[in-house]
Image (cartoon, rainbow, N blue to C red):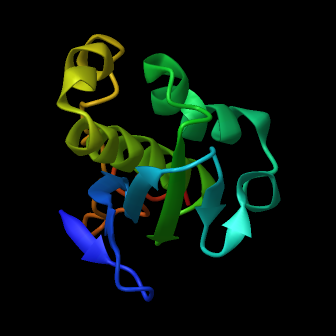
Amino acid sequence: MSVGSAGGSAVKDSLGTGRRKTSVARVRVRAGNGKITINNRSLDDFFSNLHDRNNVMAPLEATGQTGKVDVFIRVHGGGISGQSGAIKLGIARALKLHDMELFDTLRHAGLMTRDSRMKERKKYGLRGARRGTQFSKR
């Protein structure tokens, strides 16, 4: 997909959408020098936890694209862990569109599979999805 820039010259952008729990991430990948921007903030500023930062970097490191592409991300919904998982899937999908030869590498690394686990709904008569009310003898 080609998206035009303000200067009039066409810039090749690849778009990918990632979802995890209730988070949705829209990812835009273009050739660059490795800059990652999440909601107009840097990666280290947005994710303070090392595990979440590694989650975001996993598709780039698996394909060797760490310093070769710029990544622009808009993410909303859910919590920190869900957002990092959504971004991981979004980056993997965008990289696949950016270079189709990376698909096998991403697939074998397990980065193209959407984690479909969602929160189970609350049932009536119970305090949560499965927990019942506290038993009272008297």
**Seen in the image, is 104 located left or right of residue 24?**
left
- Counting from the top left corner in percent of width and height, residue 64 is at 51, 21
Tell me the quadrant of the picture where the C terminus can be found: bottom right
Whether residue 119 appears in this view of the structure is: no
Asked whether 85 or 126 is in front, the reply is 85
Q: Residue at x 45, y 59 (%)?
A: 133
Q: Quadrant of residue 110?
A: top left
Asked whether 123 or 36 is in front, the reply is 36
- Counting from the top left corner in percent of width and height, residue 85 is at 46, 44
- Asked if 84 appears above or below 11 in the picture, the reply is above
- Counting from the top left corner in percent of width and height, residue 13 is at 32, 60
Instruction: Specify the farthest residue to the top.
Output: 108
Q: Residue at x 45, y 30 (%)?
A: 59
Asked whether 21 or 98 is in front, the reply is 98
- Asked if 45 appears above or below 112 in the picture, the reply is below
Q: Residue at x 72, y 69 (%)?
A: 41
- Asked if 80 appears above or below 78 in the picture, the reply is above
- Counting from the top left corner in percent of width and height, residue 125 is at 29, 68
Q: Quadrant of residue 79?
A: bottom right
Whether residue 125 appears in this view of the structure is: yes
- Asked if 102 appears above or below 127 in the picture, the reply is above
Tell me the quadrant of the picture where the N terminus can be found: bottom left
Q: Residue at x 65, y 52 (%)?
A: 35
Report the number of discs: 0
**Seen in the image, is 68 located left or right of residue 129?**
right
